[in-house]
Amino acid sequence: MSFDGRKIILDPEEMPEKWYNILPDLPKPLPPPLHPATNEPVKPSDLEPIFPKELIKQEMSDKRWIRIPEEVLDVYRLWRPSPLIRAKKLEEALKTPARIYYKYEGVSPPGSHKPNTAVAQAYYNMKEGVERLTTETGAGQWGSALSFATRLFNMKCTVYMVKVSYHQKPYRRVLMETWGGEVIPSPSNRTESGKRILEEDPDNHGSLGIAISEAVEDAVKHENTNYSLGSVLNHVLLHQTIIGLEVKKQLESIDEKPDVLVGCVGGGSNFAGFCYPFVKDAEKEGVRIVAVEPAACPTFTSGEYRYDYGDTVGLTPLLMMYTLGHDFMPPPIHAGGLRYHGDAPTMSMLVEEGIIEAIAVKQIPTFEAGILFARSEGIVPAPESNHAIKAVIDEALKAKEEGEEKVIVFNLSGHGYLDLAAYDDFLYGRLKNT
């Protein structure tokens, strides 16, 4: 481990070799997914048309620790362990007594946390002979990560990209295509799901729910093809816990204990990966865990905790989660990765039990926060990460008012260098405060 007063970097041999599974440590058993046709609990065999057996096993596992395959660790070493950085310049700008740290996941080749699970999913599919993966993407970070991962394992990748983001973020498409991914704006005429939606609304700007429907349909209809999801499901969040496990080691190495953990939330992957390793002992150690979502898609703060489909058309199992309704159409905000109608079932239970706090913030204040962070720390954050930064700034200013030296840690889930059109809209007054 090295620490220069700002950046804490673990040695490569200190990288975690196991993922943490929160299922055994939830306050009560997780309600099972229900089959969309029968409403009966889903059996492992029901998932085999779209997922490899090893991921299905992880999805339902009661083991607390799952070993990371050496082939996956070998790819992780391209960018992991990622740095934990003290935001001293931001602290100075805010004149706060709080100490602020951020885990920077933008150091991965695709520029976000997403390859932590994309690499694992591509590996397990490759091991079972799958030749092509289909998926959805909002802002393009997940699609970029899966295109990167499938290229490493000599597989093909088809990405249904939410149409508004496809046009807002053309360089995300270019990045996916550079790695060999096929990118299709969703809804499309490629699937029956997409055709049906376009017949009803030819100008539909898309949603993650619609893109999921198209990707699942594509996978089911084609041989040697599986579907890959970038958030929500247990195995996806499991793979992301390498983030929080590293953070725990990094904080312990400098004798710091967090008072507040903050992350942005769409479906839940970066937030869960960051905070789940802390959840079991959070109440005992007095740690607050804060999930920040967009006011334009306020799943936790305005949704209902109930069973709902994970996609718009109703092809996926029903999940017990906070939801705005599977037919919810969010406004076209720039944080495309946060425009999902539901949330991870495990995280939804933790919010319902009061273990995780949830807040919603509007778009313009998040960009104000992102600009302040960029001008203080130098990194331009992804629009999604700006939601976490907004909450961190509010916590730091509260600490200033109360004269409290609290430790605030957040996940900077990705950089925003392919999202500069969003910053251009903000800087020139074209951004709506949805």
Image: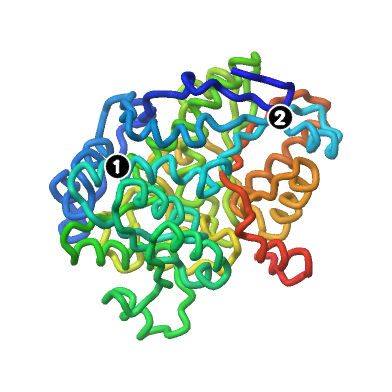
Q: Are marks 2 and 1 in contact (CB under 8 Å)?
A: no
Q: Nearer the viewer, residue 111 or 54?
A: 111
Q: Where is residue 355 in the image (x, y as percent from the top left)?
A: 50, 33
Q: State the quadrant of the N terminus.
A: top right
Q: Position of residue 401 (x, y in %)?
A: 84, 33
In space, the residues marked 2 and 1 are separated at their CA atoms by: 34 Å
- Determine which residue is flagged by label 1: 123
Q: Where is residue 326 in the image (x, y as percent from the top left)?
A: 38, 63
Question: Which amino acid, by three-letter code, is at mark 1?
Answer: Tyr
Q: State the quadrant of the C terminus.
A: bottom right
Q: What element carries label 2?
A: strand
Crowding near pointer 2: few (<14 within 10 Å), some, many (20+)? many
Foreground disc of the pair 2, 1: 1
Instruction: Name the residue rendered at 76%, 52% in the picture.
Output: 371
Question: Which amino acid, by three-letter code, is at mark 2?
Answer: Arg
Q: Is mark 1 on a helix, strand or loop?
A: helix
- Determine which residue is flagged by label 2: 86
Instruction: Name the residue rendered at 33%, 28% in the picture.
Output: 70
Residue 196 vertical placement versus 219 (above, below) = below
Residue 327: quadrant of the picture: bottom left
Q: Where is residue 109 in the image (x, y as percent from the top left)?
A: 51, 46
Instruction: Name the residue rendered at 46%, 67% in the picture.
Output: 162
